[in-house]
Image (cartoon, rainbow, N blue to C red):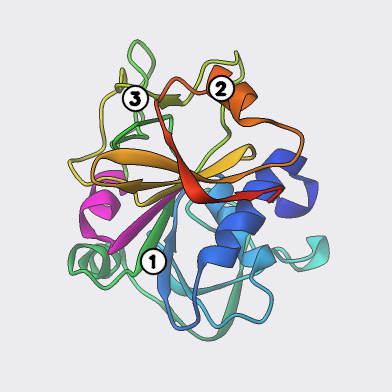
Amino acid sequence: MLSKTAAPDRVKIAQRVAKELQDGEVVNLGVGIPTMIPDYLGDKDIYLQSENGLLGIGPTPPDDEIDMDIISASKEPITIIPGASLFNSSTSFAMIRGGHVDSAILGALQVDETGLIANWAVPGKDILGVGGAMDLVAGAKKIILSLTHQSKDKTPKLVKELSYPRSGVRKANMVVTEKAVFTFEKETMYLVEIASGITVEELKKITDARFEISPNLVSDY
């Protein structure tokens, strides 16, 4: 799904993550919501990497300029900025495993209250493969998760303990949903921003994970 036709909640998440990125960073974009981020960076000078072999992703192309030879990790059409580099998968993963990615923006099926991530397999369903998830969790300097707060059946994605296979031992630094923003410190989840139209008590009802409230909580993000 292209950013211009995406659901409002997903757009909100992508816009909030985009605010977190700093000029000069090398940032890997995972499958799903992360691939929408190039459309919301404004004039920031960010080097966006796709694990299928590109450093220098630009915004979503207009319909009449789509070239399906130039796609993201989600197999969606993208553009390439001036000075971009194309390379093979081995070089792409050497960048990731070598610690050259400042931030990895990943989707997730679950994240536990300490920051452990599950984002590649659902028990009992077909497994397409872990892809680059484990490499990114292990190799990126910072991990930001972008996900809707609940699954389609209203099951919480922020849980006390993972019930899906985890993606590695590294933990997330930040979680951004359409309802809230959380950070992690010393195995504890902190609510740092909450969306308009929802109270902390209402948020707790749709969040299985336990969290503390930051003394600097920002409302109406």
Residue 117 visible in the displayed image: yes
> Residue 2, position in %: x, y?
71, 50
Q: Are marks 2 and 3 in contact (CB under 8 Å)?
A: no
Q: Which residues are magenta?
A: 132-145
Residue at 64%, 22% in the rendered image: 202
Q: Nearer the viewer, mark 1 or mark 2?
A: 2
> Residue 89, position in %: x, y?
29, 62
- Is disc 1 placed on a helix, strand or loop? loop
Q: Callout 2, which amino acid?
A: Ser
Q: Earlier in the sequence, mark 1 or mark 2?
A: 1
Q: Callout 1, which amino acid?
A: Gly
Front-lying residue, 31 or 40: 40
- Is disc 2 placed on a helix, strand or loop? loop
Front-lying residue, 142 or 89: 142
Q: Nearer the viewer, mark 2 or mark 3?
A: 2
> Residue 15, position in %: x, y?
66, 57
Q: Which residue is mark 1?
A: 53
Q: Are marks 1 and 2 in contact (CB under 8 Å)?
A: no
Q: CA distance from mark 2 to mark 3?
A: 18 Å
Q: Which residue is mark 2?
A: 151
Residue at 29%, 54% in the rendered image: 136
81 lies above or below 161: below
Q: CA distance from mark 1 to mark 3?
A: 23 Å
Q: Which residue is mark 3?
A: 127
